[in-house]
Amino acid sequence: MKEHTLIEESGAGYYGLEYLLVTLGCFRNEVESDLLRSELSSLGFAETTAVESADIIFVMTCGFVREACDEGIDTMLELDEIGSGQTGKPPMLAIGCMGQRYGADLFVEMPELAAVLGCDWQQDIEAAVADALKGVRHACRARVPAMFTGSRSVDSSDNATLYVRVADGCDRACGFCTIPSIRGPFVSRSPGEVIEEIERLSSGREREVVLLAQDLTSYGRGLAPGQSLDLAGLVERITGVPGVHWLRMLYLQPEGVTARLIEQVAGNDRVCNYFDIPFQHASESVLRRMGRPGGADDYLDLISRIRRDIPDAAIRSTVMVGYPGETEEDFSLLMDFVNEARFDWLGAFVFSPEEGTAAAELGSSIPAEVSLSRYNMVVETQDEIEASGLDRFPGRELEVVVDEICEIEPYDMVGRSYREAPVVDGMIYLKRAAAGGRTAEPGDFVRARITGHEGLDLVGEI
């Protein structure tokens, strides 16, 4: 901890102090961290990116799966080790899903922590900070989290992408999932609040607005009378906001992808022709054990309807192998589904029993080597599908958002088109068409002519 003079004003001012914030996990945590930045700024803190200059450290954690929790623990141990060489080591606070999942029990595994706060950390943040700076441990009270309702005044993204949380929580009962127990019941943000945030954070620059929620297609449920609006209606309103150049939706549950939503995507130039639909499996018997509806026929029909109405639609999904009781026949159905669906992008996962979920209590576990073999088969098949689709792009012109300057020769920039979501999908390596040709900066939307590919990533010229 660096030398400083602490000035407290009205019991809540920490002027002259700096904080370090490390964000782990999904896109939603990027929003969560910006909300925390807003709160800390209101308390007088300034942000630093160096452990050596930090007076206090915050780690925005993920607790969805054990691997994420392990990453959180490793990160906090590393931060503690870096800070141990300082005079007056800065206190460290764990915030978010991991804190919500384990609460004060984290102190047992992580004695290095000064405080543990859950998903509704805003109720405790002032008291936790005060205690931590005094050397007093603080743990949040056990309660069902409520969605943060404070004003987000900070947008930390360096490029065009603006993540916007439009709902929180989940009322589904998927047997493998910890989200309902961590995030609480589903609740929609009011459309006025969502629009106001986008207007404010998009002011003066064009943005790729990415809508986030644990269950995005349920948006509108629980809104007050007079605010009633479904996801398609919200999308239509958001794309009318100046500065919204692209709108992208993530995590669409299959049964929530309605004809009205497909129509809105098809007919609205500002909405990316991109569908991220986590099917999870294709075998009805596995899906029922997961607590999910649908099956291969339903899902293929949905995919067919999307591609009929939007021929160039990019469809991403996720599937899980090794779920308890998954037979060779079940897996064969899944492979047939992957081959027929021809996803543009696909994430595959091996089932992991998570403490507190219904699936953790199921018998008939699949041997690890069998699950890994099935996972490898899915990945290899999907790689072949993606590779076989690349030949249709050379010669096409796509609109691309520039994400960053590229340091890999001979490329100048890295970007994405409508068909690539941030981080999880591929990218497009960009070159200037000629020496002294058009230049672009991160955040710019440009036209690119696709000339080929590097592996499964496209290459283009601007």
Image (cartoon, helix red, strand yellow):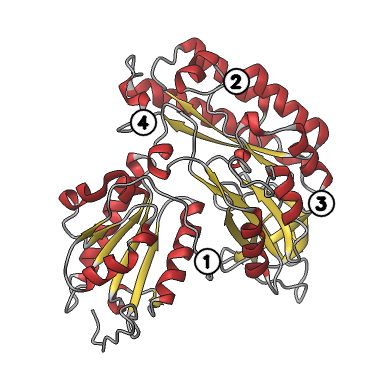
Amino acid type at mark 2: Gly
- Residue at the image position 58 percent from the left and 57 percent from the top: 163
Q: CA distance from mark 4 to mark 3?
A: 40 Å
Q: How many marks?
A: 4
Q: Which mark is residue 151?
A: 1
Q: Nearer the viewer, mark 1 or mark 4?
A: 1
Mark 3 or mark 2: name the one nearer the start of the chain.
3
Q: Amino acid at mark 1?
A: Ser
For disc 2, the marked residue is 294
Residue flagged by tag 3: what amino acid is it? Asp
Label 2 vs label 4, nearer the camera: 2
What residue would you read off at disc 4?
Answer: 352
Q: Is residue 124 above or below residue 285?
A: below
The quarter of the picture where the C terminus appears is bottom right
Is 334 left or right of 69, judged from the image as shown?
right
Q: Is residue 459 something that shows in the picture?
A: no
- Please name the residue shown 38% across and 67% down the image: 21
- Quick one: SS at disc 2? loop
Binning the other alpha carbons within 10 Å of mark 4 as few (below 14), some (14 to 19) or many (20 upward) gives some
Q: Which mark is residue 269?
A: 3
The secondary element bearing badge 1 is classed as: loop
Give how far apart the Cα atoms at labels 1 and 4 are: 36 Å
Please say if 407 is above or below 286: below
Q: Are marks 3 and 1 in contact (CB under 8 Å)?
A: no
Q: Which residue of the protein is positioned furthest toward the top in this rendering?
A: 329
Dot 3 alpha-carbon crowd within 10 angstroms: few under 14, some 14 to 19, many 20 or more: few
461 horizontally vs 140: left or right: right
Crowd around label 2: few <14 · some 14–19 · many ≥20 (10 Å): some
